[in-house]
Image (spheres, rainbow, N blue to C red):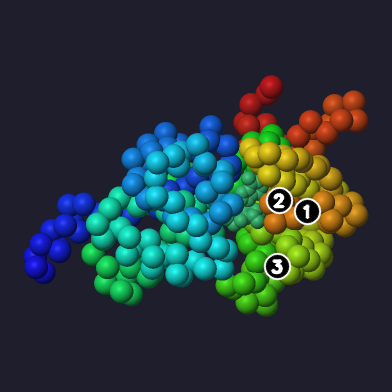
Amino acid sequence: MEVLLLQSRDNKGKLYIVSTGPGSLLQMTPGALKTLGEAECVIGNKFYLDLVTPMLAKKEVITSSMGQEVDRAKKALELAEDRVVAMVSGGDAGVYGMASIVLEVAERSGATVPIEVVPGVTAAVSAAARLGSPLSGDYITMSLSDLLTPWEEIERRLDLAFQMRVPVVLYNPRSRGRPHNLGVAIGIARRHLPAGTPVGVVKNAYREGEERLITTLGGFEEHFTFVDMHSIVFIGGEETRIWRDEGYERGIITPRGYHRKYVY
Ligand code: SAH
Protein backbone atom coordinates (compact mmCIF):
# COMPACT_ATOMS: atom_id res chain seq x y z
CA MET A 1 0.00 0.00 0.00
CA GLU A 2 2.62 2.43 1.11
CA VAL A 3 4.72 1.74 -1.99
CA LEU A 4 1.73 2.12 -4.28
CA LEU A 5 0.79 5.37 -2.66
CA LEU A 6 4.28 6.72 -3.11
CA GLN A 7 4.33 5.56 -6.71
CA SER A 8 1.04 7.15 -7.47
CA ARG A 9 2.30 10.37 -5.96
CA ASP A 10 5.44 10.31 -8.03
CA ASN A 11 3.71 9.29 -11.23
CA LYS A 12 0.48 11.23 -11.20
CA GLY A 13 0.44 14.24 -8.97
CA LYS A 14 2.28 17.49 -9.35
CA LEU A 15 1.83 21.00 -8.10
CA TYR A 16 2.61 23.90 -10.39
CA ILE A 17 2.67 27.38 -8.96
CA VAL A 18 1.73 29.34 -12.06
CA SER A 19 2.49 33.04 -12.44
CA THR A 20 -0.32 34.73 -14.32
CA GLY A 21 1.35 38.08 -15.06
CA PRO A 22 -0.34 41.45 -14.66
CA GLY A 23 -3.79 40.44 -15.93
CA SER A 24 -4.15 40.10 -19.67
CA LEU A 25 -3.62 36.58 -21.02
CA LEU A 26 -1.37 38.18 -23.64
CA GLN A 27 1.11 39.02 -20.91
CA MET A 28 1.30 35.46 -19.59
CA THR A 29 4.29 33.46 -20.76
CA PRO A 30 3.62 30.59 -23.20
CA GLY A 31 4.99 28.27 -20.51
CA ALA A 32 2.49 29.49 -17.92
CA LEU A 33 -0.40 29.22 -20.43
CA LYS A 34 0.61 25.67 -21.34
CA THR A 35 0.88 24.60 -17.71
CA LEU A 36 -2.49 26.10 -16.86
CA GLY A 37 -4.03 24.50 -19.95
CA GLU A 38 -2.78 21.05 -18.91
CA ALA A 39 -3.77 21.23 -15.24
CA GLU A 40 -6.72 19.13 -14.05
CA CYS A 41 -7.43 21.34 -11.10
CA VAL A 42 -6.79 25.07 -10.59
CA ILE A 43 -6.72 26.79 -7.22
CA GLY A 44 -6.36 30.47 -6.45
CA ASN A 45 -8.08 33.56 -5.14
CA LYS A 46 -11.11 34.81 -7.02
CA PHE A 47 -9.49 37.96 -8.36
CA TYR A 48 -6.68 36.08 -10.12
CA LEU A 49 -8.91 33.20 -11.24
CA ASP A 50 -11.28 35.69 -12.88
CA LEU A 51 -8.42 37.10 -14.93
CA VAL A 52 -7.75 33.68 -16.46
CA THR A 53 -11.39 32.54 -16.86
CA PRO A 54 -10.97 31.49 -20.54
CA MET A 55 -8.35 28.96 -19.39
CA LEU A 56 -10.56 27.30 -16.80
CA ALA A 57 -13.21 25.52 -18.89
CA LYS A 58 -13.75 21.87 -17.93
CA LYS A 59 -11.40 22.08 -14.98
CA GLU A 60 -12.03 21.64 -11.31
CA VAL A 61 -11.69 25.17 -9.92
CA ILE A 62 -11.17 25.87 -6.24
CA THR A 63 -11.60 29.46 -5.10
CA SER A 64 -9.90 30.60 -1.95
CA SER A 65 -10.03 34.03 -0.32
CA MET A 66 -7.36 36.62 0.40
CA GLY A 67 -5.82 36.06 3.80
CA GLN A 68 -6.25 32.27 3.47
CA GLU A 69 -2.87 31.69 1.88
CA VAL A 70 -1.63 29.06 4.36
CA ASP A 71 -4.81 26.99 4.02
CA ARG A 72 -4.67 27.39 0.26
CA ALA A 73 -1.08 26.13 0.21
CA LYS A 74 -2.01 23.08 2.33
CA LYS A 75 -5.04 22.35 0.19
CA ALA A 76 -3.04 22.60 -3.04
CA LEU A 77 -0.40 20.18 -1.76
CA GLU A 78 -3.09 17.76 -0.67
CA LEU A 79 -4.87 17.91 -4.04
CA ALA A 80 -1.58 17.48 -5.90
CA GLU A 81 -0.98 14.08 -4.33
CA ASP A 82 -2.87 12.40 -7.13
CA ARG A 83 -3.53 14.98 -9.81
CA VAL A 84 -1.96 17.83 -11.72
CA VAL A 85 -2.79 21.02 -9.88
CA ALA A 86 -2.04 24.61 -10.85
CA MET A 87 -2.08 27.22 -8.15
CA VAL A 88 -2.37 30.64 -9.76
CA SER A 89 -0.55 33.66 -8.40
CA GLY A 90 -0.63 37.11 -10.04
CA GLY A 91 2.42 38.75 -11.59
CA ASP A 92 5.31 36.52 -10.65
CA ALA A 93 4.53 33.95 -7.97
CA GLY A 94 7.93 34.49 -6.40
CA VAL A 95 7.47 38.25 -5.97
CA TYR A 96 5.21 39.01 -2.98
CA GLY A 97 3.27 35.95 -4.20
CA MET A 98 2.32 32.40 -3.31
CA ALA A 99 5.51 30.51 -4.14
CA SER A 100 7.31 30.88 -0.83
CA ILE A 101 4.40 29.91 1.40
CA VAL A 102 3.72 26.77 -0.65
CA LEU A 103 7.37 25.76 -0.46
CA GLU A 104 7.52 26.51 3.27
CA VAL A 105 4.41 24.45 4.00
CA ALA A 106 5.78 21.60 1.86
CA GLU A 107 9.16 21.79 3.61
CA ARG A 108 7.57 21.78 7.06
CA SER A 109 5.15 18.94 6.34
CA GLY A 110 7.72 16.84 4.49
CA ALA A 111 5.47 16.68 1.41
CA THR A 112 6.87 14.50 -1.36
CA VAL A 113 4.74 15.98 -4.12
CA PRO A 114 6.85 17.43 -6.97
CA ILE A 115 6.49 21.19 -7.14
CA GLU A 116 7.42 23.51 -9.99
CA VAL A 117 7.32 27.30 -9.96
CA VAL A 118 6.42 28.78 -13.36
CA PRO A 119 7.71 32.35 -13.69
CA GLY A 120 5.79 35.38 -14.93
CA VAL A 121 5.88 39.12 -15.53
CA THR A 122 5.85 40.96 -12.23
CA ALA A 123 4.00 44.26 -11.80
CA ALA A 124 7.19 46.33 -11.52
CA VAL A 125 8.12 45.22 -15.02
CA SER A 126 4.70 45.33 -16.70
CA ALA A 127 3.81 48.70 -15.19
CA ALA A 128 7.27 50.07 -16.04
CA ALA A 129 6.52 49.31 -19.69
CA ARG A 130 3.38 51.46 -19.43
CA LEU A 131 5.45 54.39 -18.16
CA GLY A 132 8.29 54.09 -20.67
CA SER A 133 11.54 52.94 -19.12
CA PRO A 134 11.63 54.13 -15.50
CA LEU A 135 13.80 51.27 -14.18
CA SER A 136 16.51 50.61 -16.82
CA GLY A 137 19.37 50.02 -14.37
CA ASP A 138 19.60 49.19 -10.69
CA TYR A 139 16.36 49.60 -8.78
CA ILE A 140 14.72 48.54 -5.55
CA THR A 141 11.30 47.07 -4.83
CA MET A 142 9.51 47.47 -1.51
CA SER A 143 6.04 46.46 -0.34
CA LEU A 144 4.17 48.88 1.90
CA SER A 145 2.00 46.10 3.28
CA ASP A 146 2.63 45.60 6.97
CA LEU A 147 0.51 42.46 7.17
CA LEU A 148 3.57 40.19 7.14
CA THR A 149 6.42 42.64 7.88
CA PRO A 150 6.42 45.01 10.88
CA TRP A 151 5.93 48.65 9.85
CA GLU A 152 9.08 49.83 11.73
CA GLU A 153 11.11 47.43 9.62
CA ILE A 154 9.50 48.73 6.41
CA GLU A 155 10.35 52.32 7.44
CA ARG A 156 13.95 51.34 8.17
CA ARG A 157 14.30 49.71 4.75
CA LEU A 158 12.61 52.63 2.97
CA ASP A 159 15.09 55.04 4.52
CA LEU A 160 18.00 52.92 3.27
CA ALA A 161 16.39 52.40 -0.13
CA PHE A 162 15.86 56.10 -0.86
CA GLN A 163 19.45 56.82 0.20
CA MET A 164 20.55 54.73 -2.79
CA ARG A 165 18.99 57.39 -5.06
CA VAL A 166 18.02 54.71 -7.59
CA PRO A 167 14.37 54.14 -8.61
CA VAL A 168 12.20 52.58 -5.91
CA VAL A 169 9.04 50.65 -6.81
CA LEU A 170 6.33 50.43 -4.18
CA TYR A 171 4.05 47.36 -4.27
CA ASN A 172 0.89 47.37 -2.13
CA PRO A 173 1.13 51.16 -1.85
CA ARG A 174 -2.27 51.95 -0.39
CA SER A 175 -5.26 50.01 0.83
CA ARG A 176 -8.29 50.92 2.88
CA GLY A 177 -6.80 49.22 5.92
CA ARG A 178 -3.59 51.22 5.75
CA PRO A 179 -4.20 54.48 3.86
CA HIS A 180 -1.36 56.37 5.59
CA ASN A 181 1.62 54.16 4.74
CA LEU A 182 2.07 55.86 1.36
CA GLY A 183 2.31 59.34 2.91
CA VAL A 184 4.92 58.14 5.39
CA ALA A 185 6.91 56.46 2.61
CA ILE A 186 6.87 59.65 0.52
CA GLY A 187 7.96 61.67 3.56
CA ILE A 188 10.97 59.37 3.87
CA ALA A 189 11.72 59.73 0.14
CA ARG A 190 11.70 63.54 0.53
CA ARG A 191 14.53 63.31 3.08
CA HIS A 192 16.82 62.04 0.35
CA LEU A 193 15.44 63.21 -2.99
CA PRO A 194 14.46 66.63 -4.43
CA ALA A 195 10.82 67.69 -4.88
CA GLY A 196 11.18 67.51 -8.67
CA THR A 197 11.93 63.77 -8.65
CA PRO A 198 9.58 62.00 -11.10
CA VAL A 199 6.82 59.81 -9.71
CA GLY A 200 4.72 57.43 -11.79
CA VAL A 201 1.65 55.45 -10.80
CA VAL A 202 0.12 52.68 -12.87
CA LYS A 203 -3.26 51.34 -11.87
CA ASN A 204 -4.44 47.99 -13.28
CA ALA A 205 -1.58 47.54 -15.73
CA TYR A 206 -2.75 45.36 -18.66
CA ARG A 207 -6.20 44.97 -17.10
CA GLU A 208 -9.55 46.60 -17.49
CA GLY A 209 -9.49 50.05 -15.91
CA GLU A 210 -5.83 50.71 -16.67
CA GLU A 211 -4.75 54.25 -15.80
CA ARG A 212 -1.48 56.03 -15.31
CA LEU A 213 -0.35 59.17 -13.58
CA ILE A 214 2.92 61.03 -13.89
CA THR A 215 3.81 63.64 -11.30
CA THR A 216 6.69 64.62 -9.01
CA LEU A 217 7.58 63.86 -5.44
CA GLY A 218 6.62 67.40 -4.42
CA GLY A 219 3.25 67.28 -6.19
CA PHE A 220 2.31 63.70 -5.34
CA GLU A 221 0.38 64.30 -2.13
CA GLU A 222 -2.65 65.77 -3.89
CA HIS A 223 -2.90 62.56 -5.94
CA PHE A 224 -2.70 60.07 -3.05
CA THR A 225 -6.39 59.17 -3.40
CA PHE A 226 -5.72 58.06 -6.99
CA VAL A 227 -3.55 55.27 -5.58
CA ASP A 228 -5.23 52.03 -4.51
CA MET A 229 -4.52 48.31 -4.00
CA HIS A 230 -4.36 47.76 -7.74
CA SER A 231 -1.72 50.43 -8.28
CA ILE A 232 2.03 50.38 -8.23
CA VAL A 233 4.15 53.46 -7.55
CA PHE A 234 7.51 54.36 -9.06
CA ILE A 235 9.73 56.94 -7.36
CA GLY A 236 12.54 57.99 -9.66
CA GLY A 237 16.22 57.92 -8.81
CA GLU A 238 18.62 60.84 -9.12
CA GLU A 239 18.92 60.41 -12.90
CA THR A 240 15.26 59.72 -13.68
CA ARG A 241 13.43 62.33 -15.77
CA ILE A 242 10.00 62.95 -17.23
CA TRP A 243 9.85 63.03 -21.04
CA ARG A 244 7.65 66.03 -21.80
CA ASP A 245 6.40 66.80 -25.27
CA GLU A 246 4.64 70.18 -25.59
CA GLY A 247 3.47 69.98 -22.01
CA TYR A 248 2.25 66.38 -22.34
CA GLU A 249 4.00 63.79 -20.21
CA ARG A 250 4.94 61.04 -22.63
CA GLY A 251 6.70 58.90 -20.09
CA ILE A 252 9.46 58.42 -17.56
CA ILE A 253 13.03 57.61 -18.51
CA THR A 254 15.88 56.51 -16.30
CA PRO A 255 18.92 56.63 -18.57
CA ARG A 256 21.14 53.59 -18.47
CA GLY A 257 24.23 55.66 -19.06
CA TYR A 258 24.73 55.53 -22.85
CA HIS A 259 25.06 59.33 -22.79
CA ARG A 260 28.27 58.92 -20.83
CA LYS A 261 29.75 56.78 -23.57
CA TYR A 262 28.24 57.80 -26.90
CA VAL A 263 27.04 60.89 -28.70
CA TYR A 264 23.44 60.55 -29.95
N1 SAH B 1 3.08 38.72 -7.30
C1 SAH B 1 2.61 40.01 -7.77
C2 SAH B 1 2.55 41.06 -6.67
C3 SAH B 1 1.51 40.77 -5.60
S1 SAH B 1 1.44 42.04 -4.40
C4 SAH B 1 3.53 40.49 -8.92
O1 SAH B 1 4.58 39.89 -9.13
O2 SAH B 1 3.15 41.45 -9.60
C5 SAH B 1 0.06 42.98 -5.01
C6 SAH B 1 0.51 44.33 -5.50
O3 SAH B 1 1.15 44.20 -6.76
C7 SAH B 1 -0.61 45.32 -5.73
O4 SAH B 1 -0.99 45.99 -4.56
C8 SAH B 1 0.02 46.27 -6.72
O5 SAH B 1 0.92 47.14 -6.06
C9 SAH B 1 0.89 45.33 -7.56
N2 SAH B 1 0.23 44.89 -8.80
C10 SAH B 1 -0.03 43.62 -9.16
N3 SAH B 1 -0.57 43.57 -10.39
C11 SAH B 1 -0.68 44.85 -10.81
C12 SAH B 1 -1.17 45.45 -12.01
N4 SAH B 1 -1.67 44.73 -13.01
N5 SAH B 1 -1.13 46.80 -12.11
C13 SAH B 1 -0.62 47.55 -11.11
N6 SAH B 1 -0.13 47.03 -9.96
C14 SAH B 1 -0.16 45.70 -9.82
Label 2 crowd (10 A; few <14 / some 14-19 / many >=20): many
**Between marks 3 and 1 in the image, the one whose residue lies nearer the viewer:** 1
* Residue sitting at the far top: 264
Q: Residue at x 84, y 48 (%)?
A: 216
Query: Which residue carries the number 1 mark?
Result: 227
* CA–CA distance in space, label 2 to label 3: 22 Å
Query: Which residue carries the number 3 mark?
Result: 159
Judging from the image, what secondary structure is the residue with disc 2 in?
strand
Q: Are marks 2 and 1 in contact (CB under 8 Å)?
A: yes
Query: Residue 182: where, in percent of width, then height?
Result: 77, 63
Query: Which residue carries the number 2 mark?
Result: 231
Q: Quadrant of the N terminus?
A: bottom left
Query: Residue 126: where, in percent of width, then height?
Result: 60, 40
Judging from the image, what secondary structure is the residue with disc 1 in?
loop
* CA–CA distance in space, label 3 to label 1: 21 Å
* Residue sitting at the far front: 58
